[in-house]
Structure formats: structure tokens, C-alpha cells
Amino acid sequence: MPLTRRRNAWQIAVPADAVAVLLFVVIVRSNHHESTGSHGIWHTAWPFLLGTALGLALTAYARIAPTTIRAGIRVWVWTVVVGLVVRSASGGGTAPAFVAVAAIVLGAFLVGWRAALTWRTWRTRWRRMSR
């Protein structure tokens, strides 16, 4: 049975999305020579993690499998929009370059792992059919 239909899909999606957001934050902070300590990472990450949680919650509400690309796009949009709005409201910077980088990198990370998972599942099915 493919990973997108398994009962443990949420157990894969939630930590994978959290790791994707945290990886984005660590990369951004280290590229700007800012502290990569837990306080600095949390300060930057929490608005985006909030957006990710809302995106996942709405994905569950819509009964969309969390490991699908469709879910990834939904989570990505919510992560970027809520993350940037909350970051701006809490006094964080939202320079146009940061907005662009956040949208591109988070999109690559949040949709990317799902695309890789989908590709793996599709490839396995294709091999079974071609035998």
C-alpha cells in the first residue's frame, strides 16, 4: 500500500514538515551569520511553524492525505503567508528578498519531500506493471 494511504501518513508528514521549516531557518540564519542557537532558531521559526500547523490542520479538515503533493502545496502556502504575516506583526523583518527566499525554499522543502515520495511510489508501481 502506498505511503499516501497508510494510517501513519500523519506520523510522516508532521515531523517532516517541522524538519523542513527548521532546516530553512537554520540555513537562513547561518547565511546571515546569526546565532544558530535554540533561542535564535525558535525566534525565527515559530511563525512559520504556526503556519505549517494551520496548513496541516486544514489539510486534515479537508480530508486530504498529508503526504500528497496537493497537501504539500496547501501547507506551503499557509506556512509562507501565516509565517510572514505573524513575523511582520511581531516585529521581524519581511524584506522583499526574504519573502522571495522564504517562498522558494519552503516550497522546495515542503513540496519537495512529497514529490520525492510520490515519485518513489509511482516508480515502484510502474516497475510492477512493466514486469
Image: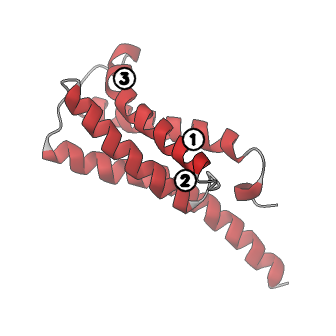
The residue at the far right in this view is 131
Q: Position of residue 77 (x, y in %)?
A: 38, 51
Label 2 vs 3, first from the N-terminus:
3
Q: Closest to the observer: 93 or 29?
A: 93
Can you say whether 127 is above or below 49 in the image? below
Find out whether the residues at labels 1 and 3 contact each other: C-beta distance under 8 Å.
no
Disc 2, SS: helix
Label 1 vs 2, first from the N-terminus:
1
Viewer can see residue 105: yes
Residue for point 35% across, 30% down? 47
Visual colour scheme: secondary structure
Kindly identify which numbered label has been placed on residue 54: none
Q: Position of residue 99 (x, y in %)?
A: 22, 46
Kindly identify which numbered label has been placed on residue 113: 2
Q: CA distance from mark 1 to mark 2?
A: 8 Å
Q: Amino acid at mark 3?
A: Ile
Q: CA distance from mark 2 to mark 3?
A: 22 Å
Kindly identify which numbered label has been placed on residue 16: 1
Find out whether the residues at labels 2 and 3 contact each other: C-beta distance under 8 Å.
no
Residue 81 occupies which quadrant of the picture? top left
Q: Closest to the observer: 124 or 77?
A: 77
Residue for point 16% across, 47% down? 97
Q: Find disc 3 in the rendering and name its residue.
A: 41
Residue 122 occupies which quadrant of the picture? bottom right
Find out whether the residues at labels 1 and 2 contact each other: C-beta distance under 8 Å.
yes
Can you say whether 118 is above or below 22 in the image? below
Crowd rating for badge 3 (residues with CA inside 10 Å; few <14, some 14–19, many 20+): some
Can you say whether 117 is above or below 95 in the image? below
Label 1 vs 3, first from the N-terminus:
1
Can you say whether 125 is above or below 40 in the image? below
